[in-house]
Amino acid sequence: MVATVPNDRPVRFAVVGVGQISQQAFIPGLSRIDDAELAALVTSSAEKAEELGKEYGVAAYSYDDYPALLDSGDIDAVYVSTPVFRHREFAEPALRKGIHALVEKPLETSEEDCQAMIDAAQESGATFMVAYRLHQEPGTVEMIEKVRDQKVIGDPRYFSSVFSQDITVENHRGHSGFWGGPIPDMGTYPQNMVRNLFHDEPVEVYAKGVRTPGREFNFDDTVAVTLTFPGDRLAQFTISYASESAEQFTVAGTEGEITAQPCFGFGPDTGIQYTLTKDGSSESFAHDPVEQFGGQAQYFVDCVRSGVSPEADGEEGLLDVRVNAAVLKSLETGAPVTLEPRRRERVVTSEQVRRISPADEPGDDELVDQIPQNG
């Protein structure tokens, strides 16, 4: 990585894809960072371009005009939050020009597309990070280090989780097929969590999906996944777009267990909480809410400034996409999918935690030209 932004001005971001997560979370979070600023918007919506460009006092570009923005010299970094299957389309050309890129998860829809972005960043030296906001959240990192390094539950043997929302079909998530559906969108959270808790990669993936009667999604809206890890360890999680909101996980080992709830969500009132049970007694830990998107942006900016490669790099994104692709194959064939053994050496550490007070988030009724994901 190379540090390319002068120290006498903030890192200038273009937000590419101005949907709900950008309007409601990333842009407010970015406003909490002293060393960064919103410099441009890129959107296919003329209404968003006009209203939000005026509200934030920045230039707004269409998708067709994106190359002109990359050549303008007006930005240092892009935050890519388009639908997943368009991430490479916008991140790769930015990276090739030496513009730093923070790309939402899942990183893309294939390992090939992920690798193309990784290669582009390596060739130019631009900072490339995948937006795993929980990798900067203090409660999450604390749990990972307790299980992985401090061995507070002994040898972790199994992981189970549920994560669900009631997604409106009219939102783009409701009609974009598997790669816009629950596994890439929400399943990435438990699978990324267990990969980091176990500090290992799955070697087999099996999935079973169903479609809820009365719903009109063009994919399996509720999916149960089983991952087998080396050492005969198991992880199971169920993801749904068609039920009441729920989020929790349990990781159990030879000497205890941790149960977390809430564990994946964000917001000004959401703090990560967990309970450690061992030797017949339980202890609970509650972390205050933090600005997860602002903390993520701050860590990214710190990496840009220092020229240090972020922990949540392209490899981390690719390894989750590898699992997502295996889930799809298992759903199509009805059979388990074997993965080649791999191990990622980089790990989440407390050094990447950023504690920033939460920003105010616009309500669903304040979103511009956007169907809220929960109706």
Image: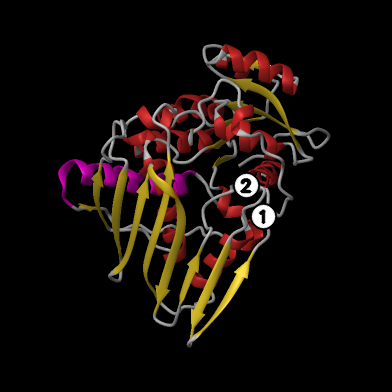
Element type at marker 1?
loop
16 to the left or right of 326: right
305 to the left or right of 312: right
Q: Is residue 364 above or below residue 321?
A: above
Image spot of residue 247 (x, y percent):
46, 55
Q: Is residue 198 above or below residue 313?
A: below
Name the magenta segment's main secondary structure: helix
Q: Amino acid at mark 1?
A: Pro
10 Å neighbourhood of mark 2: few (<14), some, or many (≥20)? some
Q: Which mark is residue 60?
A: none
Q: Is residue 28 above or below residue 201?
A: above
Q: Residue furthest bottom?
A: 279
38 to the left or right of 249: right
Image spot of residue 13 (x, y percent):
67, 30
Element type at marker 2?
loop
Mark 2 highlights which residue?
A: 267
Tags 1 and 2 in contact by the CB under 8 Å rule?
yes
Q: Is residue 176 above or below residue 134?
A: above
Q: Amino acid at mark 2?
A: Gly
Residue at 42% in and 55% down: 190
Which residues make up the magenta segment?
314-335
Mark 1 highlights which residue?
A: 289
Is residue 330 one of those drawn in magenta? yes
Q: Residue furthest front?
A: 214
Task: Let me know if residue 317 appears in the view.
Answer: yes
Task: Work out whether mark 1 precedes mark 2 in sequence or the reverse, and give the earlier one.
Answer: 2
